[in-house]
Image (spheres, helix red, strand yellow):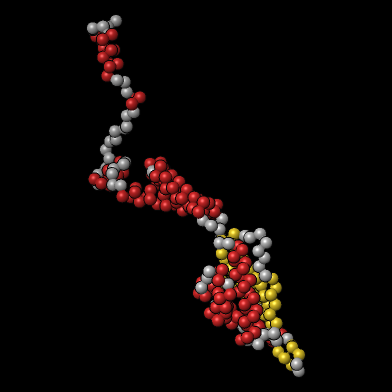
Amino acid sequence: MDIELKTILRMFKKRFWLIALIVFTITSLVGAYFYLYSKPTYEASTKIIVNKTRQINGQSELNAGDVETNMKIMGTYKDLMKTEWMMKDIVSAHPEFNLGVKDLIDKVSVSDSSGSQVMTFSVKDRSYERAVQIVNAVTKQFYKKIPELIEVQNITILNEADAKATPDRVGASPLFNVVIAFIVSFILGIGLMFLLEHLDDTIKSERDIEIALELPTLAIISKIHRQDYKPHADKHALAENSKVGDKYATN
């Protein structure tokens, strides 16, 4: 394990600038895109409650069975919201939205909580004010059109979207995206490092020689650094300063 760790550290040291370049480039591009060019997305929503009541002796009555039936029919309401029958009048009445029927259907999201008769209509858009206008128009259209098709006497809009409210961005923040880009680019750089090292078939150690030649290593010549030896000029100067016969002199 120690040898493998040393090998990895050597590889990392050798390819450090390549990894740093990849991380810097990708992180910078992602940061520039999300901070300078990407426009935030906002969401506006409304809530309604629908009760389908029964008429008994001219009076509306609602019991536990009716509530359960209302909750089961929520799926029908959600499907009706995704129809041309529901959306075409909105497109005609609000040309300022600049949306077709299909575009409006795709833009509106309908959800309901399990065991609840409350439905939530949501719209996401680059402009919060525009999202508010669209979702309020859709909610009013639901309030108007559903009783024409289903015997519903009680549809209550619990709250409309408020254009003056402080909007919250939808999705991850730019900082989060930059952090993700940093992590992904670092992993990409490490992967590229291992790939280049795998493709590099040059001999780097005695172990590589043993594998290539299938022979044991008998000797190793260590690397000599420049500061470990003296220039030849110093040896000639030493020889000139020595007296002839000094090396043979005896006491």
Image point 49% across, 50% down: which residue? 32
Describe residue 43's horizontal placement relative to residue 243 as left or right.
right
Where in the figure is residue 158, as x and y percent of width and height? 70, 73
Image point 35% across, 51% down: which residue? 195
Where in the figure is residue 48, as x and y percent of width and height? 67, 75
Where in the figure is residue 229, as x and y percent of width and height? 32, 23
Where's the C terminus, which quadrant?
top left
226 or 4, which is in the foreground? 226
Q: Seen from this angle, which residue lies furthest bottom?
A: 57
Image point 66% across, 72% down: which residue? 47
Question: Considering only vertical position in the picture, is 163 above or below 152?
Answer: above
197 or 156, which is in the foreground? 156
Where in the figure is residue 54, as x and y percent of width and height? 71, 89
Describe residue 203's horizontal placement relative to residue 117 as left or right.
left
Describe residue 216's horizontal placement relative to residue 178 as left or right.
left
In which quadrant of the rendered view does residue 94 lie?
A: bottom right
Question: Considering only vertical position in the picture, is 59 above or below 182?
Answer: below
In which quadrant of the rendered view does residue 234 lie?
A: top left
Question: Considering only vertical position in the picture, is 224 above or below 70?
Answer: above
Total numbered labels: 0
Residue 69 shows in the view: no
